[in-house]
Image: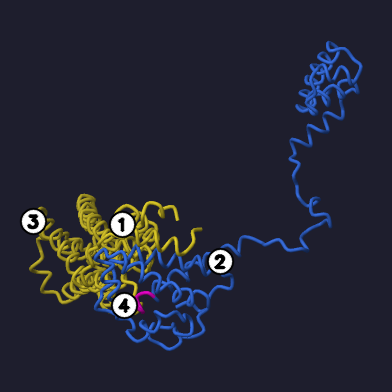
Chain colours: A yellow, B blue
């Protein structure tokens, strides 16, 4: 290992001007506007579900949609806030009230709609289109989130990746509910909770290494002579 | 916050910090407090080398004082200091000069200290440091397993050779004597030595492969 004063000299000699990050909530708003663009494009390409006006009159559906959207917004705010070194870790709890509302309405919907499930409720064609929507929403949003949060790789990788994954999952679920009319209870459970758990789980499992991988490519912050450190 | 820290982290404008580092520049830092470091970091973000060097030199003893409370070995503490400086360099764009510098730096230092403590714990769970009681013989060299199994097998095979072949191998191959020197030393002809060596090598090959000679 090098001498610390040599290291200071090497760091000082290699310094380049950097652009300060925007405040975390501004960056969260940027990410959410990207999500809005993706959602808008999908709505234009695919169209919203046919029974949207009828469903919007059901309070459970409205509360569930609002819960998913609020979870996405609050989780994105928490992720960007947590990615800064000097923010308190309590920000991690920010999306949980909205998450509780969202999850509980999914459960309530399952109980009330249980009898409504018939063998023709599940169509593979719809499921495949649903899967395409899922990928089209979650992949660009995940990549954008990872690139925007790359500096967290050195600070709080697991927590930031998990909460960022929750934001992506909630936004994906909101999009799915808006576009596809999957009313069969198992499908609701599978797509909403399943995708949310899958994305958040993947994010917390691989978030640390993926953030480090992205950071190494997008953030060449260390001078070359120290990169092997 | 690492649990090894017995007290609250010494923020730059607390009196405790002046005890840790007693250089002349400290008076300026404690009177000006974090605003000095904030201003230096703001200049560093603009690419000011001298301000950045001065800032790193100022925070180095401060970070060492935090690390020193968590690690007994000075080398470990020094590694953490260097890790913290590298992290500060890598994430310097996350610092907002409107916010205090101390908590930002302490948070980074805590992350690096926790990372290193975790690495230590992982290593301790897998590795055992050899102590004096682990040594089996009083002679230090007797504990070193310098002879590999292949070498031992070869030496054993050479000992099994007929005497004239063993002598030829030892003189010509192990002691690296020339044919003339070996002939003079043993009183045998060069041709006889060559034949003996050839047969010895063939026998050794068989012996090492496990065939009877």
- 10 Å crowding of disc 1: few (<14), some (14-19), many (20+): some
**Depth order, front residue of B146/A172:** B146
In the image, which disc is placed on residue A219? 1
Q: Read off the chain for label 4.
A: A
Secondary element under disc 3, as helix, strand or loop, is: helix
Q: Nearer the viewer, mark 4 or mark 2?
A: 2
Please state if A5 lies on the left or on the right of A159 as rendered. right
Quickly name the residue at label 4: A91
Secondary element under disc 2, as helix, strand or loop, is: helix
Q: Read off the chain for label 3.
A: A
Query: Quick check: can you spot residue B164?
Result: yes
Q: Read off the chain for label 2.
A: B
Inter-mark Cα distance, 4 to 3: 35 Å
Quickly name the residue at label 3: A44
Q: Are marks 3 and 2 on the same chain?
A: no
Q: Position of residue B165 (x, y in %)?
A: 86, 21
Q: Are marks 2 and 1 on the same chain?
A: no
Name the quadrant of the C terminus of chain A.
bottom left
Inter-mark Cα distance, 1 to 3: 35 Å
**Depth order, front residue of A166/B22:** B22
Position above or below: B121 against A124: below
Which segment did they paint magenta?
Answer: B101-105
Q: Is residue B59 magenta?
A: no
Residue closest to the far top: B191
Q: Quadrant of residue A195?
A: bottom left
* Residue in the image at 90% along x and 15% along y: B188
Q: Are marks 4 and 2 on the same chain?
A: no
Are the residues tagged 3 and 2 within 8 Å (C-beta)?
no
């Amino acid at each position: 290992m090098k001498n610390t004063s040599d290291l200071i000299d090497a760091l000082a000699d290699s310094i380049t001007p950097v652009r300060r990050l925007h405040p975390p909530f501004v960056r969260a708003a940027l990410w959410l506007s990207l999500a809005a663009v993706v959602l808008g494009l999908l709505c234009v390409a695919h169209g919203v579900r046919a029974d949207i006006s009828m469903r919007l009159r059901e309070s459970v559906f409205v509360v569930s949609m609002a819960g998913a959207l609020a979870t996405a917004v609050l989780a994105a705010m928490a992720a960007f806030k947590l990615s800064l070194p000097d923010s308190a870790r309590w920000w991690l709890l920010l999306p949980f009230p909205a998450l509780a509302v969202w999850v509980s309405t999914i459960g309530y919907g399952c109980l009330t709609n249980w009898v409504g499930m018939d063998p023709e409720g599940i169509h593979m064609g719809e499921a495949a289109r649903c899967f395409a929507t899922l990928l089209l929403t979650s992949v660009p949003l995940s990549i954008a989130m990872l690139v925007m949060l790359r500096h967290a790789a050195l600070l709080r990788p697991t927590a930031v990746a998990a909460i960022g994954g929750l934001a992506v999952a909630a936004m994906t679920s909101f999009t799915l509910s808006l576009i596809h009319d999957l009313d069969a209870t198992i499908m609701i459970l599978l797509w909403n909770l399943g995708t949310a758990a899958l994305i958040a789980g993947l994010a917390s499992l691989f978030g640390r290494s993926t953030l480090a991988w992205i950071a190494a490519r997008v953030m060449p912050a260390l001078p070359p002579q120290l990169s092997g450190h | 916050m690492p649990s090894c820290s017995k007290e609250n982290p010494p923020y730059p404008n607390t009196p405790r910090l002046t005890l840790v580092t007693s250089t002349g520049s400290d008076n300026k830092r404690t009177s000006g407090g974090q605003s000095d470091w904030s201003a230096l970091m703001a200049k560093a973000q603009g690419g000011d080398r001298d301000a950045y060097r001065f800032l790193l030199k100022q925070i180095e003893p401060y970070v060492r004082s935090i690390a020193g409370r968590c690690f007994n070995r000075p080398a470990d503490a020094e590694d953490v200091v260097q890790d913290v400086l590298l992290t500060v360099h890598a994430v310097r764009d996350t610092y907002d000069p409107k916010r205090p510098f101390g908590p930002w730096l302490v948070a980074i230092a805590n992350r690096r200290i926790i990372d290193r403590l975790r690495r230590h714990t992982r290593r301790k769970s897998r590795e055992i440091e050899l102590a004096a009681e682990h040594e089996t013989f009083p002679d230090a060299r007797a504990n070193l397993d310098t002879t590999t199994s292949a070498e031992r097998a070869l030496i054993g095979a050479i000992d099994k050779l007929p005497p004239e072949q063993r002598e030829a191998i030892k003189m010509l191959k192990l002691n690296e004597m020339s044919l003339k020197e070996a002939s003079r030393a043993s009183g045998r002809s060069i041709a006889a030595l060559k034949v003996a060596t050839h047969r010895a090598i063939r026998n050794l090959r068989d012996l090492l492969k496990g065939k009877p000679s």
